[in-house]
Image (cartoon, helix red, strand yellow):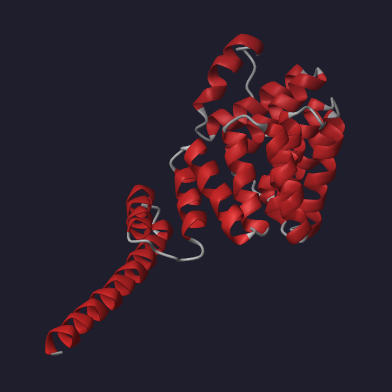
Amino acid sequence: MIRYVWLFCLLSVQLVWGQNTESELFKRGKSRMQQEEYEAAIRDFSNVLQLNGDQEDIYLYRGVAYLRVNKGQKAYDDLSKHIELYGGKGKAYYYRAMASMALSDLQMALDDIDIALIYKPREAQYHQLKSRICIGQNLYQEALEAINAALQRTPGKISFLYDRIEIWLAMERTDFALRDINLIIRRSPRDGKAYNVRATIHFQAGDRDAACRDWGVAGSMGDESVLPLIQQFCDKRQTYTRNN
């Protein structure tokens, strides 16, 4: 009788220890995600699964970690497993859409982001992702509607404005692209990238002098990528100064 009691106690201790280990590993993995230690986080999450961990979000977290280290197929598989086991909500479909993009399956990505938006219609970054997916499919009007929805939820966000500029240029609407880039420059007058982008817009619109002035400003701010463009397209005898 004493032997059976001792054996029962031992098994109970092992069970509790295993549960604590799974919980601690999962917690440490999430902490490592916050610290951008994605490979270490993947190891922790994988160890939880080897211990038969039943943490509900384990596949979700490991799938996102795989995304961060550019392992699209593994990310897709884990996120699909999470959706299979727990039904999935906006976040799972959002990240699986990103995994599908990494795998160049844009139709699957579009299907997933549409589902994500059913769950989370107010999430600006979800609309932004849909916009980028639509750009990849040359669906520019749909991309424009999506990025406008993102901007309605986060007005004036610069990364969203850059995305919209890309769409305007694809639609050959340099007038609207200039409007958006001028807004960015007014808000961030020391952003050399903005002047480079505005130069590209001017060049596409056929205004080489304006393009050269902006390339000159970008160069003066340390953007060395503009130097070959200045050498190829601009009058070397002209002095290009800042011109807002």
Name which residue lies at 80% across and 38% down. 143
Q: Up-down: is 17 above or below 208?
A: below
Q: Is residue 138 visible?
A: yes
x%, y% of residue 204? 77, 20
Of residues 169 and 206, the one nearer the viewer is 169
- Tell me the quarter of the image containing the N terminus: bottom left
Q: Measuring from the top left, give residue 52's x and y in whole percent.
A: 37, 61
Residue 132 seen by the camera:
no
Is residue 201 or residue 168 the one in the foreground? 168
Residue that lies at the very extreme toward the left in this rendered image: 3
Residue 219's image quarter?
Answer: top right
Question: As displayed, is residue 134 above or below residue 156?
Answer: above
Outermost residue on the front side: it is: 1
Q: Looking at the image, which is closer to me, 26 or 8?
A: 8
Q: Position of residue 166 (x, y in %)?
A: 73, 33
> From the image, which quarter does the C terminus lie in?
top right
Q: Is residue 180 left or right of residue 213?
A: right
Q: How many marks?
A: 0
Query: In the rendering, at what x and y percent does residue 12 appear?
Result: 26, 80
The answer to whether 89 appears left or right of 50 in the picture is right
- Rendered position, 149 above or below 2: above
Kindly identify the residue that appears in the image at 39 percent across and 50 percent down: 38
Q: Quadrant of residue 138?
A: top right
Residue 196's place in the image compared with 126, above or below, is above
Question: Which residue is located at x 32 percent, y 56 percent?
Answer: 47
